Image (cartoon, coloured by chain):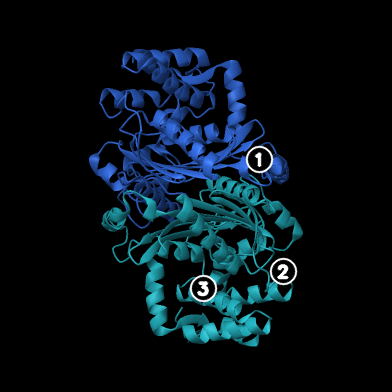
Chain colours: A blue, B cyan
Amino acid sequence: MSDNNTIFISPAQMLERFTTILLELGFTNENAHACAKIFTDNSIDGIYTHGVNRFPVFVQYVKDGHVQPHAKPTLHHKFGGLEQWNGNRGPGTLNAIHATDSAMKLAGEHGIGCVALANTNHWIRGGTYGWHAAKAGFVFIGITNTIGVMPAWGAIDSRLGNNPFVMALPYKDEAIVLDMAMSQYSFGAMELSLLKNEKLAVHGGYTKEGELTNDPAEILGSRRALPIGYWKGAGMSFLLDVLSTILSGGLAGYEITRSGIETNISQLFIAIDISKLSNNSVITKTVESIIEDYHQSVKADPSKKITYPGERVLNNRNKNTANGIPVLKKVWDKIMEL
Amino acid sequence: MSDNNTIFISPAQMLERFTTILLELGFTNENAHACAKIFTDNSIDGIYTHGVNRFPVFVQYVKDGHVQPHAKPTLHHKFGGLEQWNGNRGPGTLNAIHATDSAMKLAGEHGIGCVALANTNHWIRGGTYGWHAAKAGFVFIGITNTIGVMPAWGAIDSRLGNNPFVMALPYKDEAIVLDMAMSQYSFGAMELSLLKNEKLAVHGGYTKEGELTNDPAEILGSRRALPIGYWKGAGMSFLLDVLSTILSGGLAGYEITRSGIETNISQLFIAIDISKLSNNSVITKTVESIIEDYHQSVKADPSKKITYPGERVLNNRNKNTANGIPVLKKVWDKIMEL
């Protein structure tokens, strides 16, 4: 993103603009700042689809009443290291941070903790909670369901969500974070490719005629995104939905799809406190050795770096903190008009 | 499998043959029967690559001393719902059942339980433990590392395992079980396709020249299996290895790869006791509704059934219990010679 249509916004400027907008929408000072910071941090990390590019959608959800700015999660049920919370349709980011913190607290007491969250809103970027937990010393697994965006394997109508799945662990002062949707590309990523007039690197879904394609416009038209690994990602998406639904007692993906609005979603947060492990003192060294071997991979293209999940985020973070966050001018114009 | 090269073996006959072989290898009566039953059950379930077709490989591992028939897992460390066990290179199937049972026991006490297992052997079919836990009323997540069989994304040498990942939950008297390796096809599945002289349905890996192919012989030659979802499955494989390694304190995938033998592997077993949830009494109904919606999918090919993970296993189980287990004659001949 360095063409004529891109401008650079400093993190402070972005944070201030987002905060101002949320205050105008009736958020408390604390919530406006916390929520604006997550969207800004996602942008600093280079996850623009779940940062600055997504912010106007979030604002619309607040305006439409799907996101309740003042709602807070409430504990519904508890047994040992397992808790069920109601998100009360509050901001998905703040609910998810709260659930992650609760899972970490349970893990501190039980070694492992699990928080299931019903009736929440889109957590925007799952990696946010992976980084949050891992930087505090926890292994993290996160699951969410979503509105239907891809078909069951062998089907043509979209009854499965892309149901992002997150796994993270601490590494030195940072983290290793995998954050992936069950579709080969998220619709956010396809929208960005379209915005940049680019084709996808591999097949991302189907045309309306049922042919595999790497044209984001075609897939945005058919709404038939391809699951990762064909039947495997479709199957995993099914399980992620069922687990987040039954453990939270919240709505299943099909109910969200039928409602037509991606709200009242169901999520799952698992944390493991690695300070409770016998080998805690050598874990960093162990991970370092794994990465060292991984980086010795023989490259298919010598000009490209082999990276582990989360590694490129660190590069983006350094670059965008120093140079400002690259934003498509038309996106920023839209945000200035909000 | 119903051509001239296929014979049908009754479950009782297969169980007896496997048990006899294991007794001759020095297994105790109890262990021989338990281990033979898992290989037989996997075959009944139609997972031939991890049942009857795999049995000779397991026998060779015992003969070579990699699997210690009498070894039992020992508890190394415990905190709350979290335990670290040493598998002492015992039979991977028996160690994994033990670890699953231990995770279920912890879940009974803490709602959620996590058992990490170091120095174990191949669990053969991850679904075994998913079915085992789910039929007893638990949500289950299982992870294992393996020897390197596929490259990092952008690399050509195989430093990543296919690191199977399992998720399961109870459903009526049965279960919903997802059991998937991070490669598009397991090498077992590709070997079976080769044995049956069939091509793969989609690209499964690369030729030695670096081209994507659906020819199992080419991929078995290059040893370059394709990760599910390209970079996504490669990233998930990396995380699954790191998590099973650091939580168990056992060997990482690269260490197993360097040893040249797939032994001393690291695994993770998480169980959640759904009887401890507030919505326990309505979970079956909830899952039934999800499946009902799923089965209403509009089919791309009206002659094909849309199935959820584990659904076809039930059909295989009924069919193979009634008609006998279809086995390639040359496979059974080999087993009769063991």
Q: Residue at x 52, y 36 (%)?
A: A130
- Sort mark 1 into few (<14), some (14-19) or many (20+) by Cα contacts within 10 Å: many
Residue B66, numbered label? 2
Q: CA distance from mark 1 to mark 2?
A: 33 Å
Q: Which mark is residue B242?
A: none
| B124 in relation to A328, above or below | below
The tally of labels here is 3
Contact, mark 1 vs mark 3 (Cβ under 8 Å) = no
Counting from the top left corner in percent of width and height, residue B192 is at 55, 71
Residue type indicated by callout 1: Ile
Badge number at residue A306: 1
Task: State whether residue B111 appears in this view.
Answer: yes
Image quadrant assignment for residue A337 = top left
Q: Earlier in the sequence, mark 3 or mark 2?
A: 3
| Residue A140 visible in the picture | no
Identify residue for label 3. Answer: B48
